[in-house]
Amino acid sequence: MSKLGKFFGAGRSSKGRAAPSPQEALARLRETEEMLGKKQEYLEARVQRELTLAKKHGTRNPRAALQALKRKKRFEKQLAQIDGTLSTIEFQREALENSHTNTEVLRNMGFAAKAMKAVHENMDLNKIDDLMQEITEQQDIAQEISEAFSQRVGFGDDFDEDELMAELEELEQEALNTKMTNIRLPNVPSSSLPAQPDRLPGGTSGVSSTARRSRAASSKRTEEDDDIKQLAAWAP
């Protein structure tokens, strides 16, 4: 059997085996990347070594210098191939990681959908409507209770305002009568007026008429002032 036949035969026989998990495949890819990275370091060191040998031999030993340059070219070619391989592996690893992430997301969403379905199976829409109606009723009752507590309590406020105003007017009238009773009027002199003094010769008395009028006007103003003060003290 040829090598290709053996390869495809091995491929057909591997179909019966279970496929590796994404975690196993990712671990293998990372191991391959690590191995190729070490190979890159080795080839880069060989390139520098061959370059140093080529410079060392130079024109003194052209044959050895050419052999060193040929080896350097082969190592550089291998480095280019490894770079391409690493790029392919990196792309495959990222695609596998994304696929694994999408698979996990899909599985978790399906798990959540099943849980939600199980929760809804235990719910009755009629019971929900009844519950919401009951909650609304209780909220209304609580609002009425709050409003009842917030209202002013008016004990003894059922009196007639007209009767109260009439009683107040009577009290004011009584106070006015009391003040009028307490007003003292000026006393009237009980003694007789003094006798008119004798007139002086020439038709004039001992006190001039002008002086008498002045004293009478002053006494009258004094009495009026006293009356005004008493009225002012009596007025409400």
Image: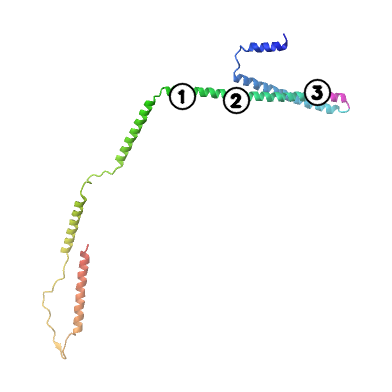
- Where is 10 relative to 140, above or below? above
Discs 3, 2 touching: Cβ within 8 Å: no
Classify residue 204 by image quadrant: bottom left
In the rendered image, residue 42, in percent from the top left (x then y), is placed at 74, 23
Q: CA distance from mark 1 to mark 2?
A: 26 Å
* Residue 43 lies in the magenta-colored region: no
Q: Residue at x 65, y 25 (%)?
A: 91
Indicate the secondary structure of the residue bearing disc 1. Answer: helix
Q: Which residue is mark 2?
A: 98
Q: Which residue is mark 3?
A: 71
Q: Label 2 sits on what residue type?
A: Asn
Q: Residue at x 33, y 37 (%)?
A: 143
Classify residue 135 by image quadrant: top left
Question: In the rendering, which numbered label is found on residue 6?
Answer: none
Nearest the eye: 224 or 73: 73
Indicate the secondary structure of the residue bearing disc 2. Answer: helix
Q: Label 3 sits on what residue type?
A: Arg
In the rendered image, residue 154, in percent from the top left (x then y), is placed at 25, 44
Task: Give the residues drawn in magenta, as a range.
Answer: 60-70
In the rendered image, residue 56, in percent from the top left (x then y), is placed at 84, 28
Q: Residue extending furthest top?
A: 1
Q: How many neighbours does mark 1 have within 10 angstroms: few (below 14), some (14-19), or many (20 or more)?
A: few
Q: Which residue is mark 1?
A: 116
- Where is 43 relative to 234, above or below? above
Nearest the eye: 43 or 24: 24
Q: Earlier in the sequence, mark 3 or mark 2?
A: 3
Q: CA distance from mark 3 to mark 2?
A: 41 Å
Nearest the eye: 34 or 79: 79
Discs 3/2, front: 2
